[in-house]
Image (cartoon, grey):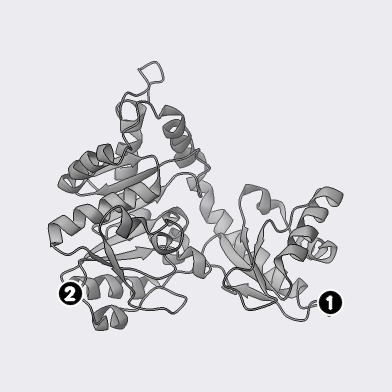
Amino acid sequence: HDLDDWTDVYGNGVVAELERRTASLLGFPAAAFFPTGTMAQQVALRCWATRTGDATVALHPQAHPEVHERSAFSVVSGLRTVHPTTEPRLPTADEVRECDEPFGALMLELPLRDAGFVLPTWDELVAVVEAARERDAVVHFDGARLWECAPHFGRPLDEIASLADSVYVSFYKSLDGMSGAVLAGPEPLIEEARAWRHRYGGQLFQQYPAALSALLGLERELPRLPSYVAHAKVVAAALTDALRGPAVPWSRIHPPVPHTHQFQVWLPYGKDALNEAALRQSEETGVTLFRRWFSDGCPPGVSVTEVTVASEGLEWTPQDVAEAVSQF
């Protein structure tokens, strides 16, 4: 983008350039920039409900709209949700076919973050999408972290995205952008989405800081993500070995071989003790192995944390991981 041009006013300029590049990357004819993914997905599913005549969305009970959005689908957008499965993974094709309630849209979060950043296989994903089509439902991908799914599927981004009727992607979760999201899809859907974006309060006067940081993320971070995904497998294996020692009665890396550059670590201690240990290790050694630990939804006495392997993590050898675990 020519930085001598006017930056943006209500979505033109650099924002429009980001929309064009993202649509091209994902293989869709059009895209619209939103200040948040929460807004982008509400608008997408609301627009699809108008087209299908069915305001019911099939999704996982651990999907972002069910857990992290204060019931916005129902309270703000008039949508209802059903759950084809409650297992800690995305639904199978048979579960989608056998769902005992009709639905107009199937929403798949790739990867399913709260279940451990887990993904289906490529064949399983194709089968799930086909099962939804058999039920005359549209398919929407919650692709907040779609960027790092390509290595697992062994497919380019546009081939993955093309399975769906619409896709949302985030710019700050994996690409180090400041904020913002894009909804990509067919031109008529995106035109209507722009109207609803205005109604929802998402047509900001200027958004060039977020848009510029997103463009930088596409240029700098996106090509690095496969190396992060590959090294996450090295780090996860090293953690598994290091936590097998006699000092730790039980531990779990989930998934054992990460599907993306993020995974979970489970330990049999309360979150307060683990957070204190993590903070003291950072302060006393200058090394941060784990960040925040959580116990919500965990069995008594068990806590979980999320590990993300990014540029700094590429420097960590298995020996570095072992030493850090010993310190922790």
Q: Image height check: is 67 above or below 98?
A: above
Q: To which residue does mark 1 refer?
A: 247
List x then y, in percent, for residue 149: 44, 60
Q: What kind of residue is marked 2?
A: Arg
- Which residue is drawn at the image coordinates 54% and 48% (left, top)? 224
Q: From where the camera sits, is residue 222 visible?
A: yes
Quarter residue 73 falls in = bottom left
- Residue 125 sits in which quadrant? bottom left
Which one is nearer the viewer's eye here, 313 or 190?
190
Is there a contact, CB below 8 Å, between mark 1 and mark 2? no
- Name the residue rendered at 15%, 46% in the picture: 188
Q: Which residue is mark 2?
A: 135
Mark 2 Cα-neighbour bin, 10 Å: few <14, some 14–19, many ≥20: some
Left of 111 or right of it: where is 116? right
Q: Quadrant of the N terminus?
A: top left
Viewer-proximal residue among 73 and 231: 73
Mark 1, Cα crowd under 10 Å, few <14 / some 14-19 / many 20+, is few
Residue 282 image point, x, y percent: 79, 51
The reply, left or right, for residue 312 in relation to residue 282 is: left
Q: Is residue 36 left or right of residue 106?
A: right
Mark 1 lies on a secondary structure that is: loop
Given the current orientation, which residue lies at the most extreme front position?
Answer: 75
Relative vertical location of residue 150 with respect to residue 241 in this rendering, above or below: above
Q: Residue at x 79, y 65 (%)?
A: 325
Which mark is first along the chain, 2 or 1?
2
> Amino acid type of disc 1?
Ala
Task: Give the residue at x 20% y 52%.
Answer: 47
In this view, the residue in front, 321 or 112, is 112
**From mark 1 to mark 2, how far is it between C-alphas?**
52 Å
Q: Secondary structure at mark 2?
A: loop
- Image quarter hosting the C terminus: bottom right
